[in-house]
Each structure stands twice: as structure tokens, then as C-alpha cells.
Image: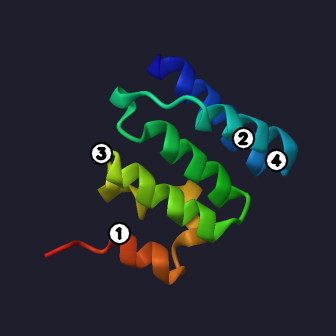
Amino acid sequence: GLGSMDYLGYLGAIAARQGNREQALRVERRLAGAERPYFFGRHTIWRARIRALLGERELATTLVREALSRGYPHADELHTDIDFESLRDYPPFQELLRPKI
């Protein structure tokens, strides 16, 4: 369920923050296999967080784009989310979050 997915996501984000790349990527791979229609991109946002924390800006941005296309509902919070700090000055990420007219 959503609880275990968030738990897994937090574990991956913590591992990435601590510099434990292997553990972070293990979690990210598990999240990649957790596709469910009703997740609305939440598992993909966790994957993006982990990749952003590992400094992988291009892949993180691609995953954010994928999550948004799956209906992730909190796009307006991503530009202030500390986990995405490494992407703030990255033009493709800025463009992705720019309000659409």
C-alpha cells in the first residue's frame, strides 16, 4: 500500500543523503517495480527524489516529468521541496515546473 511505499521512499532518500549510493539505488529499483494505477506517480516521485539527492539531475527531472504525466497531484510543492534542491538551478527542471498558461 501507500504506507509501505512511502516508508521505502524515505529509506532510499535517507540512504542517498548519507552517501550510501548502493542502498539508495536498491530502493529506487524496488520502487521502479511498484507500479500501480492508483499511485498517481507517487512511487516515481520517490525515485526522482533519490536520484536528485544522488546528484543525477537529468534522470531526476525525467522521473519528475513521468510522475506528473501519471497524475502526481503536488507539483506546486516540488520547487520548495528540499530533496529537489540540486535541481533548482537546472533549466529543464525549472521549465517543467513553470506554470502553464
What crowding class fits label 4: few (fewer than 14 Cα within 10 Å), some (14-19), or many (20 or more)?
few
Inter-mark Cα distance, 1 to 2: 25 Å
**Marks 4, 3: nearer the viewer:** 3
Q: Which of marks 3 and 1 is nearer the N terminus?
A: 3
Which secondary structure lies at badge 3? loop
Image coloring type: rainbow
Q: Do the residues labelled 1 and 2 touch (CB within 8 Å)?
A: no
Indicate the secondary structure of the residue bearing disc 4: loop
Which-is-in-front pick, marks 3 and 2? 3
Q: Which residue position is annotated with label 4?
A: 18
Residue beneath disc 2? 14
- Is any part of residue 11 visible from this angle? yes
Provide residue 53's location: percent of width, then percent of height: 68, 57
- Number of residue marks: 4
Horizontal placement of 62 versus 11: left or right? left
Residue displayed at 41% across by 41% down: 41
Q: Give the residue displayed 39% in from the left and 31% down from the top.
A: 39
What's under tag 4, amino acid-wise? Gln
Amino acid type at image mark 3: Gly
Above or below residue 86? Residue 5 is above
Residue at disc 2, secondary structure: helix
Q: Quadrant of the C terminus?
A: bottom left
Q: Which of marks 4 and 3 is nearer the N terminus?
A: 4
Q: Earlier in the sequence, mark 3 or mark 2?
A: 2
Residue 97 disc label: 1
75 w.r.t. 24: above or below: below
Contact, CB < 8 Å: mark 4 with mark 2? yes
Q: Which residue is drawn at 69% across and 38% down?
A: 29
Residue receiving disc 3:
71
Quarter occupied by residue 66 = bottom left
Q: Position of residue 86 (x, y in %)?
A: 62, 69
Residue 75: % across, % down: 33, 55
